[in-house]
Amino acid sequence: MKKSLVSALVLTALAASFAAQAVSFEKPADAIKYRQSAFSLMASHFGDLGAMVKGDKPFDAKTAQANADLVATLSALPWAGFGPGTEGGKAKPAIWKEMDKVNAGAKELQTAAAALKTAAASGNLDNLKKAFANTQKTCKSCHDSYKDK
């Protein structure tokens, strides 16, 4: 478990570094796959935090911190996959008409994920619960507006 978590952290750091640079895709399908993969990874780590917050899984401060670190890093990645001509996937058509709102939401998510990371680093479950709820609210806002069910 520890080796896979360390590997995931290293790969995520590399991915974030790559994403910070200009990302280009040969086909629109590549961009769709990229953003869906980033969201899927983020959901996996956020879900693990959610299980701790809800009490479905014992709270483990180190695991919570590792997951929150990954969520914070991953929150910067998917947006490169929303370029012109990448319509489709699970995104509603409205997303391309409201990219200013989407970009503002992306920044809100990154801010909330950074606060989640800080809360997890405190080792305090109550702090994590508050930051988790705020991050979840930010995610839900975008999902409700722009994601097909």
Image (cartoon, helix red, strand yellow):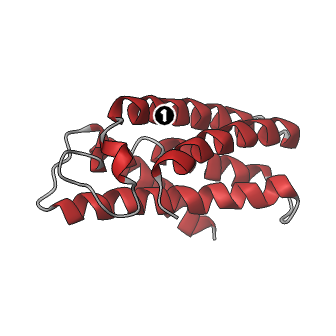
Q: Position of residue 96 (x, y in %)?
A: 30, 43
Residue 50 in percent (x, y) is at: 74, 56
Is any part of residue 16 visible from this angle?
Answer: no
Which is more toward the observer, 125 or 66? 125
Residue plotted at (87% across, 39% down): 126
In the structure shown, which secondary structural element does the residue marked by tag 1 occupy?
helix
Q: Which residue is mark 1?
A: 105
Toward the viewer: 136 or 19?
A: 136
Asked whether, in this view, residue 73 is left or right of residue 96, the answer is right
Please rate how many residues cluster around mark 1, counting C-alpha atoms within 10 Å: few if below 14, some from 14 to 19, many from 20.
some
**Vertical side of 119 occupied by 48: above or below:** below
Of 124 and 81, nearer the camera is 81
**Residue 134 quadrant:** top right
Residue 60 in percent (x, y) is at 80, 55
Q: Amino acid at mark 1?
A: Gly
Give me the residue at 62% from left, 65% from top.
Answer: 2
The quadrant where residue 20 appears: top left
- Residue 1 is at least partly visible in this image: yes
- Quadrant of the frame with the N terminus: bottom right
Position of residue 44 in the picture relative to residue 15 (left or right): right
Of 99 and 122, which appears nearest the observer? 99
Locate residue 7 relative to residue 5 in the image: left or right: left
* Residue at image coords 54%, 68%: 4
For residue 94, side relative to residue 46 (left or right): left
Q: Residue furthest left?
A: 26
Horizontal and vertical percent for residue 99? Answer: 34, 35
What residue is rendered at 11% in x and 60% in y? 26
Is residue 125 positioned above or below 60 on the image? above
